Image: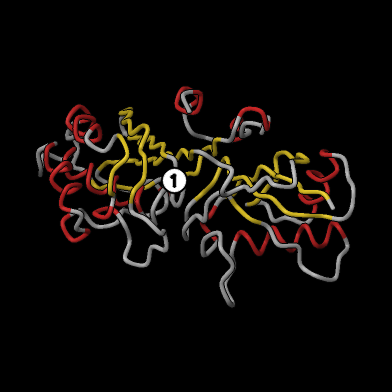
Amino acid sequence: MMRIALGVQYDGSAYCGWQIQPDQATVQNTLEQAIQQFIGKKELVRVTAAGRTDTGVHALGQVVHFDADVERDPWSWVRGINTFLPNDVVVNWAKVVPPDFDARFTAHERTYIYAIVAGPTRSPTLAKRVGYHMMPSGQWFDASAMQIAADYLIGEQDFSSFRASECQSKTPMKHLYECSITSEQPFLYFKIRANAFLHHMVRNIVGSLLVVGQGKQKPEWIKTILQAKNRELAAPTFAPDGLYLMEVGYPKDLAIPTPHWQNAWLPKELMLSV
């Protein structure tokens, strides 16, 4: 029996998130069926992911693992599984990992990027790939104010104010390493890196930072929300469309490959900074 890790990318627009749900199309079920078909097994091969992305959320650097009693070279796993996957899901790399490797619990950090396009009207060619925020012509976000606000989130803190009510995490304590904003009109990018995330945490943070960026609240408002530990005080959860799981960090000795970002449409300089 071997443990195999895969690097997976997907457009989450057509899926009800990563995790298997009854009578719903999910990325996990789609990938498991493809592995089963490639191996030729009667029973389904279960996979474990580094992060359970929500409905409509995308991934450029998802990592999963599964156990197999058949031996294939890495490229055979990639090519073989991709043969049975739809166009919106792809395996980019495969690697034999130690038997105690766990895609979720061996990871020490995750990086998400949220991409927004803002303007008087939405962009039909970017639908489901970016979040949209209506903004009159001649207006733009105060990126400096948003960055000041974002800096209050850095460190190990209680993120209850940015946690969904259905979150299953055992603790609201998470360590945020980075929360940076890049403004390139008409696009706005949020890069958020932490040891782990609560359910809807990134989308709730983005929604609240946008309130600051529009001048509706001062940067210190984010600090007040954080300290209150009250979800009702923060902004509504922002749409999932522009959220991407960019990379999952593992101990260097495991030599886990980096994501294949050359296939992504996001700005090259943004991805190189991950």
Residue 48 lies, in percent from the top left, at 63, 55
Q: Residue furthest bottom?
A: 23
Residue sitting at x 24%, y 44%: 120
On screen, residue 262 above or below 44: above
Name the one closer to the observer, 6 or 104. 104
Q: How many marks?
A: 1
Q: How is the image coloured?
A: secondary structure
Report which quarter residue 223 is drawn in.
top left
Residue sitting at x 60%, y 52%: 49
Report which quarter residue 221 is drawn in.
top left
Residue 147 lies, in percent from the top left, at 23, 30
Residue 134 lies, in percent from the top left, at 24, 47
Name the secondary structure under disc 1: loop
Q: Residue furthest front?
A: 100
Report which quarter residue 153 is drawn in.
top left
Does residue 203 appear to the left or right of 43 in the view shown?
left
Residue type at tag 1: Ala
Name the one closer to the observer, 198 or 142. 198
Residue 264 lies, in percent from the top left, at 56, 35
Name the one closer to the observer, 233 or 228. 228
Residue sitting at x 70%, y 40%: 92
On screen, residue 112 above or below 25: above
Q: Which residue is mark 1?
A: 196
Residue sitting at x 10%, y 43%: 217
Q: Around disc 1, counting alpha carbons within 10 Å, would you say few (fewer than 14), some (14 to 19), or many (20 or more)? A: many
Name the one closer to the observer, 88 or 194. 194
